């Protein structure tokens, strides 16, 4: 089966969205892509099919919270703290590693 994505669906308009701080600092902007309605609908269809497949066949673990209905960072944190509390109650030691994934400033 051959298929091709229409060229117009591959084009997006990228605009810089100001976050906070000095407007002259480019690190204070977040790029936002604006895509066509057709591409957005296609993206949603693919997402729904893939999400349904992963859910139906139990491919994602229960701890996976990103991009899932009724899951969020709060869900992930509640699950983690509940697990830590159970470990403490059982006399086990918890080891936790936190990573700061903030974007590094551009070198000038």
Image (cartoon, helix red, strand yellow):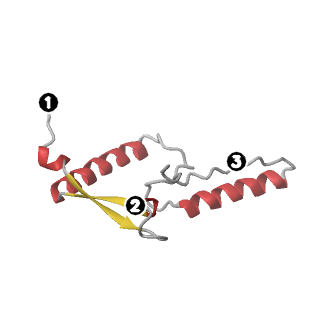
In the rendered image, which residue does mark 2 sit on? 30
Give the x, y percent position of residue 4. 14, 37
The earlier-in-sequence mark between 3 and 1 is 1
Q: CA distance from mark 2 to mark 3?
A: 27 Å
Vertical placement of 1 versus 106: above or below? above
Give whichever of 89, 95 is nearer the camera.
95
Q: Secondary structure at mark 2?
A: strand
Image quarter where the N terminus lies is top left
Q: Is residue 81 left or right of residue 106?
A: right
Give the x, y percent position of residue 98. 67, 51
- Rendering quarter of residue 15: bottom left
Q: CA distance from mark 1 to mark 2?
A: 36 Å
Give whichever of 51, 17 is nearer the camera.
17
Give the residue displayed 77% in from the left and 54% down from the top.
Answer: 86
- Rendering quarter of residue 40: bottom left
Q: Secondary structure at mark 3?
A: loop
In the rendered image, which residue does mark 3 sit on? 97
Label 2 environment density (alpha carbons within 10 Å; few <14, some 14–19, many ≥20): few
Label 3 environment density (alpha carbons within 10 Å; few <14, some 14–19, many ≥20): few
The earlier-in-sequence mark between 2 and 3 is 2
The earlier-in-sequence mark between 1 and 2 is 1
In the rendered image, which residue does mark 1 sit on? 2
Give whichever of 32, 104 is nearer the camera.
104
């Amino acid at each position: 089966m051959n298929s091709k994505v229409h060229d117009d669906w591959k084009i997006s308009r990228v605009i810089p969205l100001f976050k906070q701080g000095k407007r002259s600092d480019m690190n204070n902007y977040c790029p936002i892509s604006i895509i066509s309605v057709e591409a957005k609908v296609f993206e949603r269809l693919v997402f729904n099919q893939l999400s349904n497949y992963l859910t139906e066949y139990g491919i994602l673990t229960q701890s996976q919270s990103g991009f899932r209905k009724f899951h969020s960072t709060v869900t992930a944190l509640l699950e983690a703290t509940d697990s830590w509390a159970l470990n403490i109650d059982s006399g086990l030691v918890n080891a936790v590693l936190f990573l700061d994934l903030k974007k590094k400033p551009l070198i000038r």
